[in-house]
Amino acid sequence: MNNEPNEKKIIIKRKNGGKDPQDSSLVSYVVSVLIIFIILSAVYSFISNRVSKSVEAIAISQLSQDVKAGLVKSILVKGESLDIEYRTGEKKTSKKEESEALLQTLVNYGVTKDQISQVSIDIKNDTGLGYWILNLAPIIFPILFILVFIWFITRQVKGAGMQALTFGQSKARMIDPNDKSQRVTFKDVAGAKEAKEELLEIVDFLRNPKKFLDIGARIPKGILLMGAPGTGKTLLARAVAGEAGVAFFSISGSEFVEMFVGVGASRVRDLFLMAKKNSPAIIFVDEIDAVGRVRGVGAGGGNDEREQTLNQILVEMDGFEPNEKVIVMAATNRPDVLDPALLRPGRFDRRVTLDLPDRKDREEILTVHSGKKPFGEDVNLKVIAERTPGFSGADLYSLMNEGAILAARESRTKISQYDLIRSIEKVMLGPERKSHILSKKEKEITAYHEAGHAVLASLLPYADPVHKISIISRGRALGYVFKLPLEDNKLQSKKEFLDDITVSLGGYVTEKILFDDLTTGPSNDLQVSTALARDMVTKYGMSDMLGPIALEGQGGKVIYGRGVEEKEFSQKVAADIDSEVARIMRESHQKAEKVIGENRNLLDAIAKRLMETETIERAEFETLLVAHGVTPKKKLDIEHQV
C-alpha cells in the first residue's frame, strides 16, 4: 500500500495538536451540548426562584393566627400546598402535612369552627395527565435529555460509518432521458458534421440494436472523442444520449482517483453496474487521460491507484456482451498519452476527432448561442464568424456572453455589432487596461513598434493583411496588430512561415533603427518567432541543410512537473539545428531591416496616426497604404503583441 495517505493523515493530526480531526469534532460537539444543557438548567432555576420569591411563604401556625384574627379571605388547598388570599388582596403560600386535613390542622392550632366558617376553603385535587407530568417532570426530563443526546451522537457516528461504506460508490451524474430540461440533441450542436455522422450509427444501435445483432454486426463498445479544449466533446456526447433517448452517466476521470488504493476500481465497478441496470445507457468519462495514461512509466504522475483504476476500466469494457446495450464514450485533448490497451479493438476502437470550427461552422455556433439574446438591426454574425478564426465553440460562447455583458453595462436593451466586435478582442487579449497610462516616450516606442509589424504585414507577399492596429493596453500586451483572414487555411507553407517570422521581428527592428536602443517590448515576439523557426527545422523538414527529417516530436515526458524533450540525435545535429534556427532568424531580421528602411515614410505616418488616435481600423489603414503607393491585400489572421 502507498505510504503517502498515512503521511498526510499524520500531518493533519499534528496540525490539530496530535488529535484526529473527526475526534476533535465529536468532542467539540459533546462539549457544546453540555454547555447548552447547563445554560438551560440555570435559566430554569433562575425563573423558578424568581416565581417562588414573588409570593411570600408563611408557617401553618401563622396561618392559624391570621384565621383567628379574621384576616384570611380564602384558602385553596392543592395537596400539601396552600394558596392563601387575605382580605387586603395580599397573597401568600403555606404548607400542611399531606396526610392530614386542613380543618383538623387548624383545629389543632386552636381555631374554632366559627372562625373557620368565615374563610372560603376550596380543595383542588390534581388528577389526569397534567398531574402526572408535573410530578414526574423532575425524573422524565433528564432521562429524555440523555436519550436525545445519545441519539444525536449515534446518528453522527452512523453517518460517518455510512460515508465510509459508500466511499467506493460511483459519483457519476445521471441525466434521465425523460428530463426534457436537460436533454440535448444534435440540433443543439452546431458544426462538427463529420463527427455527428460518425455518431449516428451509435444512435441507431441504441434505438434499434436488433437490426445490427441479427446480421452479426457488433457496434463499437467505446468511442473516444478527441479534440482541442472547447470544441464540444462533452456536448456531443450528451447529444448522442439525447438523440437515442437513453440514460447518460457522466463522470470525470479525476473523480475515480482517491488517496486510498482500490477506491477508484470500486467506483468503476459501481458505475458500470449502474449503467447495466439502466441499459440502454451511455457512460461518458471526461478527461480520461487523468486515469488512462500509459502504465509503468514511473513518471508523469503514475501510481498504484491510477493503474488499478485503469485496469478495472479495461476489464469492465472487456466484460461487455453485445446485447447489454451499454456504450462507453470518453473525451480527451491528449490522445497521445493514453495507454495502448485502451485504444485496441474491442475497447475504444472508434475515434472521433473534433477540429476547431471553420467559418461556416462558427456562424452556425454563433446562431445557436444567440437564441435568447436581443440583437440590434446592425448585427451580422457572418462578419463576426469571419473575424474569429481559431476560436473554439467555448470561445464563441464566451464572445456572445461578453457582448451581452457590455450592452448591459451600458444600460442598453439590445446587443449591437460594436459590442460583439469589442468582445472578440476581449476574449483573445483580455480587457482594456485604461488605467495603464503610458508616458509620452513609451507611447511613441509602442506606436512605432506596432507600426513596424503593420508595415511588414502589408508589404511582404505571404504575410497576413492587417485588420486593426492599437496601442491600447489589453491583458499583458501594450499594443497589438490584429490580422484577419477571409478564408480558413488548413495548411501553411514555408514562405508563409518565413514572412510570419519577419513580421514578428518588425517591432524589434523598428525600435533598434529609430531609437538606437531595445526595450523588453519585443520579448514575446522573439519567443514566438524563434519557436516557429525551430519547428520549421525540427518538425516540418523545412531546412535546406538538414533536409526532410523530423527531429522532435509533438511533446516530451514530464518529470517533476517540467517538460523534458527526448532528443534522439547527436550533439552535432543539435548544433546544426541551432545554426539553422539562427540563420533563419538572421535572414528574417535582414529582410525586416530592408523593408522598413525602404518604407520609412509609411512607418512614420502609421506611428503618428497611432499616437493621435491610439487605434487604426482597417478602412483607415488601407487609406494610409494607398496614400503611400501600397496596394492593400487580403489574407489570414494572426496577432502580434508587445
Image: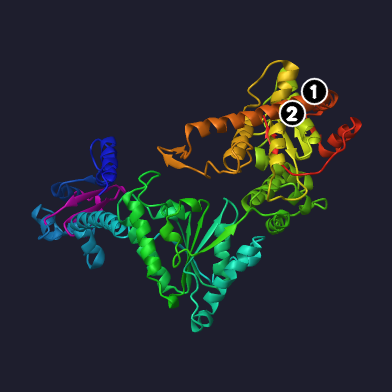
Q: Is residue 368 above or below residue 539?
A: below
Residue 621 visible (yes or no): yes
Mark 1 highlights which residue? 597
Disc ID at residue 591: 2
Residue 517 or residue 137, whichever sits in front: 517
The reply to whether the magenta stretch includes residue 261 is no
Q: Is residue 498 above or below residue 146?
A: above
Q: Is residue 281 above or below residue 57?
A: below
Q: From which residue to which does the magenta span run?
A: 68-97
Left or right: 35 in relation to 269: left
Residue 608 visible (yes or no): no
Q: Position of residue 604 (x, y in %)?
A: 82, 23
Considering every residue shown, the one lying at the far top of the view is 516
Residue 443 or residue 134, whichever sits in front: 443
Left or right: 216 in relation to 147: right
Q: Amino acid at mark 2?
A: Lys
The reply to whether the magenta stretch includes residue 70 is yes
Considering every residue shown, the one lying at the far left of the view is 108
Q: Is residue 51 above or below residue 164?
A: above
Q: Secondary structure at mark 1?
A: helix
Question: At 65% from the left edge and 20% from the top edge, which residue is drawn?
Answer: 519
Q: Secondary structure at mark 2?
A: helix
Disc ID at residue 443: none
Comes first in the chain, label 1 or label 2: 2
